[in-house]
Amino acid sequence: PNVYCYAANNPSESILAKRRGYGTLVSYNVPPYGRAGLYLELANLKDLVDEYRTGASRDQDLRYSIWSYCLRCGIHSDVPLLYQVDGVEFSVSEADLPTGLSVEAFDSWLRTLSDYLVEVQDRLFSSGLHTLGSAPTDDELLSYLQAYFGDSLNERDCRKVIESRRLKTHANTVDMSSFWEGVKDFASKFLRFDFQGASSEETYESGRNETLFDEAKSIVSLLSRNTEEIDSVLTALDGGYVRPAPGGDLLRDGTAVLPTGRNIHALDPYRMPSASAWAKGQRIAEETIRQHLLANDGQYPETVAVTLWGLDTIKTRGESISIALALVGARPVKEGTGRIVRYDLIPLEELGRPRIDVLASLSGIFRDSFANVVDLLDDMFERCVAVNEPLDMNFVKKHAQELELDGVERPAARLFSNPPGDYGSMVNEVVGSGDWDEEDSLGETWKGRNLFAYGRNEGGGIIGTSRPEVLDKLLASTERIVQEVDSVEYGLTDIQEYYANTGALKKAAENRKPMDGKTNKRKKVALSVVEAFGGGSQNDDDSQPPPVRDVEDVLRLE
C-alpha cells in the first residue's frame, strides 16, 4: 500500500501523490495558532499610547516620550508622523517634535499608531507543531477558536464552549446522576434566553450568538477527532477504506475540512474561479489599481505580473485567476452545468478604464493541475489582442502590436512557466550553493527557467514553447507584481518560494528598467501582497477593504 500523510491545508501538492503514485492520502491537522503580541519597547509604547488616549495625561512630556519610543522601535517608518508648513507636507524624523505640530495633528497620528500596534499584537502565526493522531489541549482549542472567530466570539465564550465539551465527555464516562444534572443545569443557563419584552435587535443578537456557539461547538467536536488520523493510517495499511474529504484551511474554508485523517481531494478545475473567488478577486484587483494610481500620480500600470500557484488557487477557489481576469477586464462564463467554458471580455464602456496587460507566472503544479484554465486564459488573451479597441485603452493589444512589428511570433503569449515536466526557478539552489555574485543574476536565473509559454495556442495542456522575446517585453513593461499569501502558517520570510519565485521575478523586471540619472539605480517594481486568509466567520465581510499591502509593509509586520 502507498499511504501518504499530508497536511490538510495543502491539497495541491498532496494530490500529486494520488495522481502519480495512486497513493491513499491521510490528512493531518495544522498546528494551533498564536498571536504575535507585543514585547519590550513595543509593549511600553502601547502602554504610553493607552495612557495618552484615556486622558490620564496628555501633556507635552508624554507626547515626547511616545515619539522617543517610536524612534527607538523604528515605528516612525511604518506610521510616519506628518505635518504641514505653508501647504507643504513633511515627515518628522528628528528626535524633537517640531514646534509647528498641532495637538490635533499629533492626536490624529496617535490614533493611526494605536490601530497599527493592535494589528501587530493580534497578528496570527503558526505556533508549534502538530503530532499525528493527537487531540488538541484546551489551550490549543482556544487558539483555534480565537483565530477562527476573531472578535465575533470573545475568550470567555470560547472557554465556555470548550468547558461544556469537556464536561459532556466526562459525563459520558462516569455514571453520576447528580453530576449529569449539574451539566444539564449549566447547559440550560448557558443557552437560555428570555424573549419576553426583547427588542428585535436583542432577538437578532441572541440568534446570532446561538449560531456562533453552535459553530464553535462543532469546531471543538471535530478538532477533538484528530485521533482518527492514526486510525486512518492503520485502516489504509490494512487495505480498508479511508473516507474522503476536501482539503483546505479551517480559517478560509470552514468546518468542511474537518475532521482530519481523511483521503483529501481538491476541487473541480472546470468551476474556477468560484463565485466568491470572483467577487473577491475583482475587489483585490480594484484595490491594487487604486493603490498604484495613488502612488504614481494617477498613471495606470501597463503590465502587472500575477503569480498563479497551485496551492493558493485551490485554497482560495481561484482568487488569483480572478485577479488576472479583473485586471485585463474579463469575466467567467458558465454553461448550463455550472462549468466555466470561456472568459469573456468586458466592454470598455462598462469597464471604465484601460485593459491592463498581465504577465501570468505559473508554478509547475498550477500548469499541470489546471491545464483547462491555462487554455481558457490563453484564448482570452488572443481575443484581447484581436478586439477593435484603441491602444491607449488596451495595453495587451498595444504590447502585442509592438512585438508583432519586431517580427516576434505569438505576441499574445502571456502564461509563462518552467520547461515542460520541470519545476522550480532554481534560484533557491543557486543561493544555497553560493554560486552568484549580484542580485541581478538571480533575476536572470528566474527568467531562464520561465521562458516557456503555455496555452491553447501553444498546443494545449502541458505543452509549452520557449518565447524569450515576449517574456522580455512583458518584464520590461511590468510595473507591479501581485502575490497571494494563503496561510498564517508561513510568511514571506519563512519559505524559499517567495524569494526564489516572486522576489526573483521582481528582480528580473527591474533588470529591464532604465537607469535613473540622479540615483544611478534602476526603477523599482512594486510588489502587492494579498493576505488571503482570516477568521472563517469573517471571510465574507465585503465592508472591509481587501488586504492588499506593499511588500515593505508586510515585511515590517513580520
Image: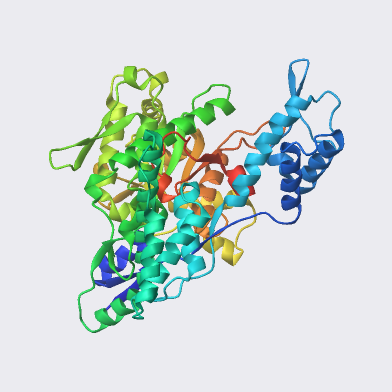
**Residue at (45, 70) in percent of width and height:** 136
Residue 351, position as x, y percentages in the image: 35, 22
**Residue in view at x 31 percent, y 34 percent:** 381
Whether 467 is drawn above or below 107: the answer is: below
Task: Say if residue 4 shows up in the picture.
Answer: yes
Is residue 120 shown left or right of residue 88?
left
In the rendered image, the quadrant that contains the N terminus is: bottom left
At which x and y percent is residue 338?
A: 17, 42
Decide if residue 80 is on the left or right side of residue 57.
left
Residue 65 position by quadrant:
top right
**Camera-side residue: 254 or 233?**
254
Report the side of 373 relative to 327 (left or right). left
In-front residue for pair 557/173: 173
Which image quadrant is residue 166 in?
A: bottom left
The vertical placement of 252 against 545, above or below, is below
Count the marks.
0
Q: Residue furthest left?
A: 336
Question: Residue sitting at 56 percent across and 38 percent down?
Answer: 525
Where residue 434 sits: x, y (%)? 61, 64
Relative image position of residue 418 (x, y in whole percent): 39, 54
Asked if residue 97 is positioned above or below residue 49 in the image, the reply reads above
Q: Residue furthest bottom?
A: 238
In this view, the residue in front, 490 or 121, is 121
- Residue 422 shows in this picture: no
